[in-house]
Image (spheres, coloured by chain):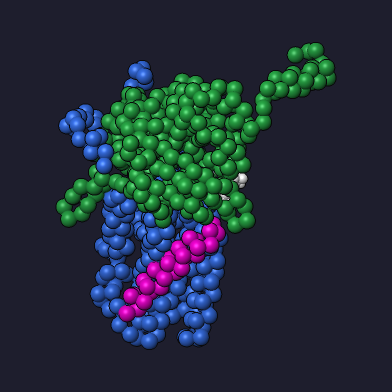
Chain colours: A green, B blue
Amino acid sequence: MPAPIIELRHVNKSFGPIDVLHDISLKVDAGEVLCLLGDNGAGKSTLIKTLSGVHKPTSGIVLMDGKEVTFANPREASEMGVATVHQFGGTFPLMSVGRCFFVGREPTKKWGPLRIYDRATANEIAVKSIQGFGITRIDDGDRLVGGMSGGERQSLAIARAVHFGARLLILDEPTAALGVKQASHVLRIVLEARKRGLAVIFITHQVTHAMAVGDHFAVLIRGALAANFLKGEKTREEITDLMAGGESLANLDAEVQDVMDAEGSRASPVA
Amino acid sequence: MSDTLHRTGAPPATRSARSFSFGALARRPEAGSFLGMVIVFIFFAIAGGANFVTLGGTASWLNVAAEIGIVALPVGLLMIAGELDISIGSVIPAASMTVAIISGYFGLPLILGVAAALALGLLVGFVNGILVIRTGVPSLIVTLGSLFAVAGLTLGLSVIITGSTGVPIQTGPIGKALLGQFIAGIFQVTILWWLVAIVVVGFLLHISRWGNWIFALGGDKVSARNEGIPIDRLIIQLFMSSGFAAAFIGISQAILYNSAQVSTGQSFIFNSIISVVIGGVLLTGGFGSVVGIVFGTITFAIVNQGIFYTGFDANWASLIIGVLLLLAVLLNNTFRKMALNYSPKKGKS
Ligand SMILES: Nc1ncnc2c1ncn2[C@@H]1O[C@H](COP(=O)(O)OP(=O)(O)OP(=O)(O)O)[C@@H](O)[C@H]1O
Ligand SMILES: [Mg+2]
């Protein structure tokens, strides 16, 4: 069994006096999707930012392929094969598909004594990679990214990560704010990335999305690893309870019903 | 790494030749400013009578456009990157005074005065850039500070050194030929420098990879940093280029008018920003083009000078510019939306 692509051992992270992550140990193998679950503010984004070079762990170590690594900045992490699509970001609405795809790593060609941005190559590779993930509607690299749908933009970001040789793909809520169809598109792309042998860390608040692609689940509650289990080891209801921060949601229906009844008795019968 | 897997593969698919289409032109950032320029030109060609379309009339707005344009280009780059620089308003007179004091008052070689003035512009830009990246204070406020600081320094030092707020400067034939001459008696040589600047900045923004970084920086600063773009260096470079351009204009004005005053240049602040915005650059960054900035500058200069050829009181020029600015922004927004919503071959999905 080869070493996992990424492994965290006893990672802690605090911002000054605020402890955000406590003693996290996790690993993800090649061709495996880890779903990182947890309530708002549980520390999911912070955890993946320590993996992508945005933050450094306060203590604990990160290993890639069994060797300890430290990332001074996001650039170093991406050079080591960690590609991150951050929550709320990653694409530039007013840039063309080709320019956005290659941002920071623009292909150049010789032009007399000068080196210039190679628009034709950029557009062609960008369009081909995006289409390779099944988004065949994108056929013009000069099109602006802002004109694409949310799912297509996520797909662009993922296709870019795969193109640049990512081995660990980190997706922070890529299906938030997407409709059912768009979300299923993104989920299919996650599965395609897994098929290509990438390790994937996938953050979501939707149980359905998690269960559709996850091989392995980790739940954070207030910065600590509350559960770590494989597909099929827990039921949908158990996972939902864990995602809500460990509280049982069994009574939820009854509570909601109470609230509705209270509202109903006050509201006038017009509507 | 596994990326070779995806980089190789089928040979490049031959792209269909780009055929001419009005739709494609309308989606370009300069579409709105081109339309504005044509309308304004036609208006003044009619209202201004025959004199406006003569060589003399053309020279009058081209000269103004060239001076504003040289500053508007780097100001436009900064705006595309999401930053503003209003300190140019006092870098221009500071550079004028520097060259006049060194090469006029002290009589040292012109080259020394020019070098010192350009260095001053670069230095102010460098300081602006450092302050913006270190403090995180919006660049409007940072450069508002340096606008006043540089103005105060210029006034104070000029009075201490020369005892006056204006200094004459006489330059030799070479200096005049390069920076202070009229071609055919009416066209300022600055126009040629503007053309050079257009080509250089156009190359940097649209053809080099550096330009892509500027768009990314203005589009989303955090993502640009995450993608490994050296945004701090980029911001400093951009502020230094606007400082340099402002100093260049200051020098050429001193040489053209054979004197320098401490209080010229404030008008460049708004004039350059207006030109850039009319030119289709998005005030919040991430979108724009060099050709658009050039069109915007020409439009501004035509209104600014064309008014003198009409029977109207020149005071109305500000009204026209104000209305034009609002119209241009609306027009540019419309064209930008068209570009965003454009998707080829709508029928197929
Ligand atoms: N730079 C920072 N400085 C101080 N506190 C921070 C910082 N970044 C995050 N935190 C805190 O850490 C906690 C976890 O935040 P994080 O963004 O990781 O949550 P999350 O699990 O991603 O939540 P969500 O599901 O809402 O995206 C929050 O309480 C947040 O306020
Ligand atoms: Mg988050």
Q: Identify the image quadrant of residue B338.
A: top left
* Image x and y of residue A29, in percent: 38, 36
* Image x and y of residue B183, in percent: 27, 63
Residue farthest front in this picture: A1
Residue farthest right in this picture: A266
Q: Nearer the viewer, residue A134 or A42?
A: A42
Q: Is residue A63 left or right of residue A180?
A: left
Query: Which residue appears at 36% of the width and 49% of the height?
Result: A67
Query: Which residue appears at 45% of the width and 33% of the height?
Result: A34
Of the four image quadrants, the one with ligand 1 is: top right
Q: Nearer the viewer, residue A185 or A255?
A: A255
Q: Is residue B76 left or right of residue A222?
A: left
Query: Which residue appears at 38% of the width and 51% of the height?
Result: A68
* Quadrant the C terminus of chain A occupies: top right
Q: Identify the image quadrant of residue B45.
A: top left
Q: Identify the image quadrant of residue A3.
A: top left
* Image x and y of residue A135, in percent: 35, 25
* Quadrant the N terminus of chain A occupies: top left
Residue B113 counted in the magenta span: yes
Image vertical order of residue B242 relative to residue A55, above or below: below
Numbered range of the magenta stretch: B112-138
Residue B205 appearing in the image: no
Residue A251 appearing in the image: yes
Count of numbered tags: 0
* Image x and y of residue A180, in percent: 49, 21
Query: Which residue appears at 54% of the width and 27% of the height?
Result: A206
Image vertical order of residue B144 relative to residue A36, above or below: below
Q: Nearer the viewer, residue A37 or B212?
A: A37
Classified by dominant secondary structure, the portion drawn in magenta counts as: helix
Residue A232 counted in the magenta span: no
Q: Nearer the viewer, residue B347 or A171?
A: A171
